[in-house]
Amino acid sequence: MDALFERWAAYNADKRARNTIKRYRASFRSLAAFTHLRDARGLTADDLFAWAELRRDVDGVSPRAINKNDLVAVSSVLQWATGRSGGRILPDNPARGLSLDEPRIVGQRERTFREHEITAILRAASAVVQEHDNIARSAARRWCPWLAAYSGARIAELTSLVRQDVRIDGGIPVMDLRITKTGEPRTVPLHNDLIEQGFLRFVEASEVGPLFFDFKRHKANAETSPAEQQAKAVAKWVRATVKLDPGVDPNHGWRHTFKTRALGAGIEERLRDAITGHRVASVGRRYETPSLSMLSRAIERFPRYDTSNSTATQ
């Protein structure tokens, strides 16, 4: 089991995002432990279904998460093992078509932050005072929520920023998001509100290297990168500080919020997708590559967040 996964991981090292391989490895390790490292060629659909039930009933993972993450991961690896690139180790994929029944979810709240949540998070971020014994942590808390609010970027994409990623391109202040979930880098213009708050001054005063984490505080060989660890720490801090509703994600909620507010501001869908790094749905749209000036004008149209009272402006 382990050998099969490592072969798949090596083959996909330049084809899959690092985070995808990490997530798949966790699922495969769980399956390997369940089967006591049995030869993958002896796996049956019954084995996999029993493992999925254990993940649900013993590990407490939701059926939706098991279907979307665990079974997708295992099926992808086993399917690869049936093909030429995988050496045709398996005659067929026992995970194909396998899933757990998902209970109907009633009354789930929207994933977009509500106005009082927006105000509370951004106020908390603005109130952060630099910690001299942990500058990176306080910087991440101060700036990452605001950067996410004005870009819809994933927090881990922001905590990956280094000093040279923030620059001026043709008179436009931008940030280069090089490490992304999809593996496709993108450049996003900075909103004027961020500049007025002093983000560029913060960057200029920072040392060369990561803006939001310190290598010295993280294990060198940890599976989770320092940027990802810091992103999780920001999420934990936001949830604890703001007492956030458990039904909304303290980091990912900004992606939903940005897209919703951009829609309300009349920003075209193709531009919204380019800024947030969402894949374009139609073939025709893939031929359109918004220029930096187009993205900059879109960001200029994006409404400012007003945290001076209990309601953010629309």
Image: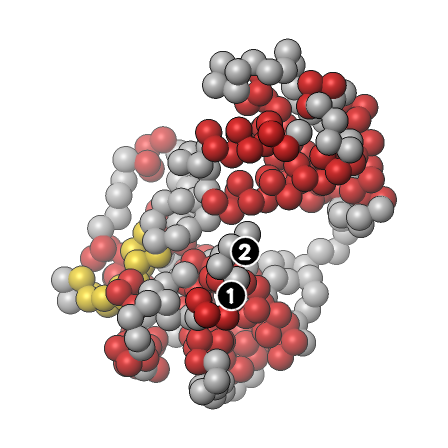
Is residue 173 positioned above or below 14 on the image? below
Quarter holding the C terminus is bottom left
Residue sitting at 46 percent across and 70 percent down? 216
Tell me where residue 22 appears, x and y as whole percent.
Answer: 56, 45
Residue 238 placement, left or right of 274? right
What amino acid is at disc 2?
A: Ala
Residue placed most toward the observer, 216 or 93:
216
Q: Are marks 2 and 1 in contact (CB under 8 Å)?
A: yes
Q: Position of residue 221 (x, y in %)?
A: 51, 55
Element class at badge 1: loop
**Residue 16 visible to the viewer:** yes
The tag on residue 105 is none
The local secondary structure at tag 2 comes to loop
Which residue is denoted by mark 1 in the rendering? Answer: 218
Residue at x 46% of width, y 29% of height: 11
Mark 2: few/some/many CA within 10 Å (<14, 14-19, 20+): few
Q: How many marks?
A: 2
Q: Could you tell me residue 7's position as x and y percent? A: 53, 29
Q: Is residue 260 visible?
A: no
Residue pictured at 26% horizontal, 65% vertical: 164
Q: How many other residues sit within 10 Å of disc 1, few (<14), some (14-19) or many (≥20)?
A: some
Q: Nearer the viewer, residue 154 or 23?
A: 23
- The correct choice, above or below, for 306 with respect to 183 in the image is below
- Cα–Cα span, label 2 and label 1: 8 Å
The amino acid on which the numbered mark 1 sits, given as a three-letter code, is His
Q: Residue at x 46, y 48 (%)?
A: 181
Q: Is residue 244 left or right of residue 14?
A: right
Residue 53, quarter of picture: top right
- Residue that badge 2 annotates: 222
Q: Nearer the viewer, residue 114 or 51?
A: 51
